[in-house]
Image (spheres, grey):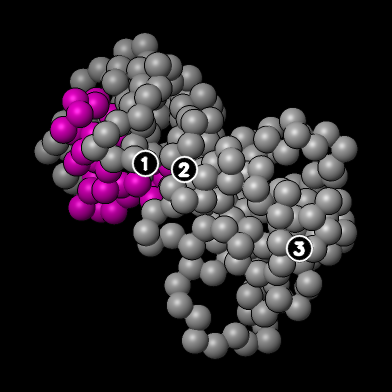
């Protein structure tokens, strides 16, 4: 089949048109007219991922994060972008559309953490709200660490947590909207020092559990979409964790 068939299938389920204005979702390198029999799924395009794609004979690499994000002024021969172009492989990303999609990054994060009754909010397309059985911030932090691995940094506002806001990745700025929505806590991947300080003043316990750890499971939706439509398609995976924890 042609890669465009894969592109169109994903576009139907996770529309590329829903990408944020600042995002660069979709085709980054290669051609939709190329044939494909093997796809490699990954969170990011790295040298390691490109080598894995070559090793398994993948004609397409599907990632969450885009290969090209900001403006490119030069492409040096040892850069990831140069290696991607030289590989002859096609690279497609499903970044922010996957963040907001039903069953995508934030819904899968909620499932991992046992957050129920999850729903979108009008105030922020990335932010989701859900519920857990009331527990302390310390207990919730233990649950997050157990479910996602890595480490958890958090503030404790000294009250039981039951209404939870979720935004995988770099969602620390969502703490202000979470407070407006009456959330007891926000779980995200990254947060700045001032956002942690503000969370205490806002009364929203803020949990930062790692960009990778809060997003990697979102690619399961893409796997499900592909398996369901093309069961004979060869799928390979490369999700190397970029950070080690003591």
Q: Residue at x 29, y 53 (%)?
A: 192
Q: Residue at x 40, y 22 (%)?
A: 118
Q: Where does residue 224 sit, x and y in percent of width and height?
A: 69, 33
Disc on the earlier residue, 2 or 3:
3
Q: CA distance from mark 2 to mark 3?
A: 27 Å
Q: Where does residue 160 sit, x and y in percent of width and height?
A: 25, 17
Give the secondary structure at mark 3. Answer: loop
Would residue 59 be visible to someone looking at this image? yes
Give the labeled residue for mark 1: 126
* View extreme (top): residue: 133
Q: Is 77 placed above or below 225 here? A: below
Q: Where does residue 40 sit, x and y in percent of width and height?
A: 75, 52
Left or right: residue 191 compared with residue 80: left
Q: Quadrant of residue 21?
A: bottom left
Give the labeled residue for mark 2: 99
Would residue 154 be visible to someone looking at this image? no
């Amino acid at each position: 089949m042609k890669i465009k068939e894969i592109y169109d299938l994903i576009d139907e389920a996770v529309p590329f048109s829903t990408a944020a204005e600042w995002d660069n979702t979709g085709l980054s390198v290669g051609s939709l007219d190329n044939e494909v029999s093997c796809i490699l799924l990954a969170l990011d395009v790295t040298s390691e991922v490109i080598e894995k794609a070559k090793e398994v004979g993948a004609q397409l690499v599907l990632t969450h994060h885009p290969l090209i994000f900001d403006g490119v002024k030069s492409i040096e021969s040892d850069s990831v972008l140069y290696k991607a172009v030289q590989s002859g492989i096609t690279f497609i990303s499903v970044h922010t559309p996957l963040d907001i999609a039903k069953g995508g990054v934030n819904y899968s994060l909620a499932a991992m953490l046992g957050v129920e009754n999850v729903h979108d909010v009008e105030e922020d397309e990335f932010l989701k709200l859900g519920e857990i059985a009331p527990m302390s911030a310390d207990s919730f932090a233990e649950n997050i660490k157990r479910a996602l691995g890595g480490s958890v940094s958090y503030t404790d506002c000294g009250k039981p947590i039951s209404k939870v806001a979720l935004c995988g990745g770099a969602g620390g700025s969502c703490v202000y909207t979470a407070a407006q929505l009456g959330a007891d806590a926000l779980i995200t991947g990254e947060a700045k020092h001032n956002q942690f300080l503000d969370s205490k003043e806002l009364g929203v316990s803020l949990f930062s559990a790692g960009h990778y750890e809060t997003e990697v499971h979102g690619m399961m939706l893409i796997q499900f979409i592909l398996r369901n439509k093309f069961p004979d398609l060869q799928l390979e995976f490369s999700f190397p964790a970029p950070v080690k924890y003591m």
